[in-house]
C-alpha cells in the first residue's frame, strides 16, 4: 500500500509538472524534488535521468501543440537546439564530478533578477519586437542554447523559464513565441541528457514510463490553456512559477 501511494503521488507530481512546464517551464521544480523525496537513498544521477525520461514526452507534445498555432522561428530555434543538445550532454556528464547544489546560490540570484525585471517591465513579452533573424540572432540563440543546455543537463529546475525570459529579452519574442521556441530547445536538452544517463547510470524505466504518461496528460492541458488564454495568462504563470522557484531555492540554500 505504501508503494502504491508513493507511485500515485509521483504520478500526480508529474501531471502537475507537465501542466506547468507546458505553459512557462519549471516542471522540474515539481517533479525532481518529488523524486528526491521519494527515493532519498538513490544516486542523484539516476534520479536526474529518470526525471528527464518522465519529461521528454510531455515537452515534445507541448512543442507539437504550440506549433499548430504559433509559428516556430526555425532560423534561431534549430541552431539553438543543436547548441542546447551539446551543452546538455556535457552538463549531464558534469553531474558525476560536481555537486549540482553548488549552483543554488547563483541560480537563486539570477531568478530574483528575472522576477524583478519581468514585474517592473509590464510590457515585457506582451508585444513581439522580433527582428528579421540574421547572424546576430543566430549567435544569440546558440549562446543561449549552449549555456542553458549545460545548466539543464547539470541541474535543471527553471530551464524553461530561463529560456523564455532570454528569448523575450534578447530576441524580442512575445511570451507565446518564446514558449514554443523554448520547448524546441528543451526537447533537445532532454534527449541529450537521457542519451548520456542511459549509457552511464541505472535508470528507473518503469517508474519513468508511468510518470511520462502523467506528464504528457498535464502537458496537453497546459499547452491548450496557454493558447486559449494568450500572452497575458502566460506572463502571469511565468511570474508565479519563478516566484515559487525562488522560494524553493531560498529554502534549499539557507534553511535546509
Image (spheres, grey):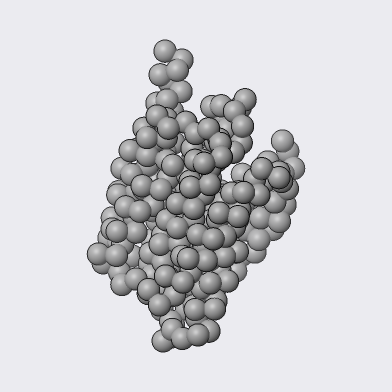
Task: Look at the picture and state if 207 lies above or below 123.
Answer: above
- Name the residue at the top extreme: 1
- Asked if residue 248 can be seen in this view, the reply is yes
Q: Considering depth in this image, is 82 or 15 the residue closer to the camera?
A: 82
* Residue drawn where x is 54% and y is 27% of the image: 38
Q: Considering depth in this image, is 72 or 237 the residue closer to the camera?
A: 72
Q: Is residue 214 shown left or right of residue 256?
A: left
- Name the residue at the front extreme: 199
Q: Position of residue 46 (x, y in %)?
A: 55, 35
| Image quarter of residue 227 | bottom left
Count of labels shown? 0
* Residue drawn where x is 64% and y is 45% of the image: 95
Q: Quadrant of the C terminus?
A: top right
Q: Position of residue 85 (x, y in %)?
A: 50, 59
Q: Considering depth in this image, is 69 or 206 the residue closer to the camera?
A: 206
- Asked if residue 35 can be seen in this view, the reply is no
* Residue drawn where x is 56% and y is 40% of the image: 200
Q: Position of residue 30 (x, y in %)?
A: 50, 41
Q: Position of residue 217 (x, y in %)?
A: 31, 42
Task: Look at the picture and state if 5 lies above or below 110.
Answer: above
* Residue drawn where x is 40% and y is 26% of the image: 8
Q: Quadrant of the N terminus?
A: top left
Amino acid at each position: 500500500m505504501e508503494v502504491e501511494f508513493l507511485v500515485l503521488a509521483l504520478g500526480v507530481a508529474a501531471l502537475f509538472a507537465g501542466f506547468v512546464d507546458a505553459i512557462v517551464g519549471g516542471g522540474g521544480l515539481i517533479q525532481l524534488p518529488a523524486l528526491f523525496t521519494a527515493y532519498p537513498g538513490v544516486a542523484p544521477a539516476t534520479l536526474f535521468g529518470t526525471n528527464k525520461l518522465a519529461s521528454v514526452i510531455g515537452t515534445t507534445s507541448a512543442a507539437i501543440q504550440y506549433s499548430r498555432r504559433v509559428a516556430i522561428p526555425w532560423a534561431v530555434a534549430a541552431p539553438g537546439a543543436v547548441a542546447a543538445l551539446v551543452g546538455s550532454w556535457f552538463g549531464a556528464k558534469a553531474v558525476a564530478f560536481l555537486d549540482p547544489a553548488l549552483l543554488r546560490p547563483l541560480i537563486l540570484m539570477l531568478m530574483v533578477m528575472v522576477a524583478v525585471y519581468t514585474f517592473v517591465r509590464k510590457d515585457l513579452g506582451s508585444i513581439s519586437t522580433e527582428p528579421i533573424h540574421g547572424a546576430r540572432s543566430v549567435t544569440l540563440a546558440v549562446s543561449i542554447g549552449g549555456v542553458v543546455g549545460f545548466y539543464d543537463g547539470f541541474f535543471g529546475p527553471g530551464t524553461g523559464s530561463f529560456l523564455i525570459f532570454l528569448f523575450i529579452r534578447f530576441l524580442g519574442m512575445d511570451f507565446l513565441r518564446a514558449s514554443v521556441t523554448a520547448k524546441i530547445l528543451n526537447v533537445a536538452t532532454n534527449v541529450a541528457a537521457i542519451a548520456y544517463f542511459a549509457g552511464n547510470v541505472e535508470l528507473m524505466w518503469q517508474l519513468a514510463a508511468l510518470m511520462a504518461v502523467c506528464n504528457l496528460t498535464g502537458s496537453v492541458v497546459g499547452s491548450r490553456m496557454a493558447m486559449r488564454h494568450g500572452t497575458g495568462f502566460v506572463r502571469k504563470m511565468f511570474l508565479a512559477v519563478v516566484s515559487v522557484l525562488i522560494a524553493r531555492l531560498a529554502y534549499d540554500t539557507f534553511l535546509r
